[in-house]
Image (cartoon, rainbow, N blue to C red):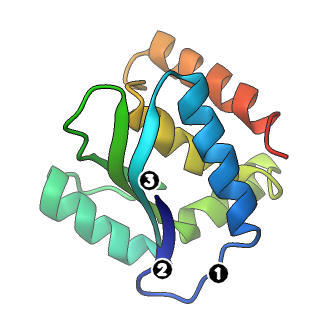
């Protein structure tokens, strides 16, 4: 089950069904299934508090992902997305149409086991994001 909710702001994701099918296909292509996945859309302030409280990071970020998977080949977790960061990055990179989808699939890729700490990991993550963005339909 995939859910979309908002916390300290009003946001309604358009084409929820389309997004759900897309995310399910991404997981399936990576050899996993989604049992429970919650996307929580929020502000910079809300996500900064999560970042400070749970990760001891005092920085703004566009996404924080919590993996709660207990069984192999399944995805269960929460993905918190700052819409403030997404909007700013969309303007900065001229990706208004795709930035939110990129961040959403980025969170899922983390839950699928991909990392982005090293340069090579970031390159792999970006390639995967681009690949799956092209398959959103």
Q: Report the number of discs.
A: 3
- Give the foreground label among 1 and 3: 1
Left or right of 19 on screen, residue 109? left
* The one of 127 and 16 positioned closer to us in this rendering: 16
Q: Residue 19, how many percent across, how many down?
A: 68, 56
Residue 135 versus residue 98: which sits nearer the camera?
135
Instruction: Residue 81 in the image: state x and y as whole percent.
Output: 48, 62
Q: Residue 18 appears at what percent x and percent y?
A: 75, 58
**Quick one: label 1 or label 2, which is nearer the N terminus?**
2
Residue displayed at 27% across by 26% down: 72
Whichever of labels 1 and 3 marks the residue nearer the N terminus, that label is 1
Provide the secondary structure element on which disc 2 rests. strand
Q: Position of residue 28 (x, y in %)?
A: 56, 30
Q: Which mark is residue 3?
A: none
Residue wearing tag 3: 63
In the depicted structure, whether residue 24 falls above or below residue 116:
below
The secondary structure type at the circle numbered 3 is strand
The 10 Å Cα crowd at callout 2, few under 14, some 14 to 19, many 20 or more, is some
Q: Mark 1 points at which residue?
A: 12
Residue nearest the viewer, comparing 24 with 116? 24
Of the two numbered discs 2 and 3 on the same chain, state the one appearing first in sequence.
2
Q: Which residue is drawn at 60% across and 82% down?
A: 11
Say which element carries label 1.
loop
Q: Determine whether label 1 and label 2 are within 8 Å by CB.
A: yes
Cα separation between marks 1 and 2: 8 Å
What is the residue that sits farthest to the top in this orientation? Answer: 120
State whether residue 33 appears in this view: yes
State which mark lies toward you, 2 or 3. 2
Q: Mark 2 points at which residue?
A: 6
């Amino acid at each position: 089950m995939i859910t979309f909710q908002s916390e300290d702001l009003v946001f309604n994701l358009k084409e929820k069904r389309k997004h759900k099918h897309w995310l399910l296909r991404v997981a399936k292509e990576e050899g996993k299934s989604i049992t429970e996945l919650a996307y929580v859309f929020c502000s910079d302030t809300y996500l900064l508090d999560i970042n400070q409280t749970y990760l001891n990071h005092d920085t703004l970020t566009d996404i924080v992902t919590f993996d709660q998977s207990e069984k192999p080949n399944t995805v269960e977790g929460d993905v918190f997305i700052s819409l403030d960061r997404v909007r700013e990055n969309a303007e900065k990179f001229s990706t208004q149409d795709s930035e939110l989808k990129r961040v959403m699939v980025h969170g899922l890729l983390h839950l699928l086991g991909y990392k982005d700490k090293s340069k090579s990991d970031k390159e792999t993550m970006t390639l995967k994001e681009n690949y799956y963005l092209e398959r959103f339909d």
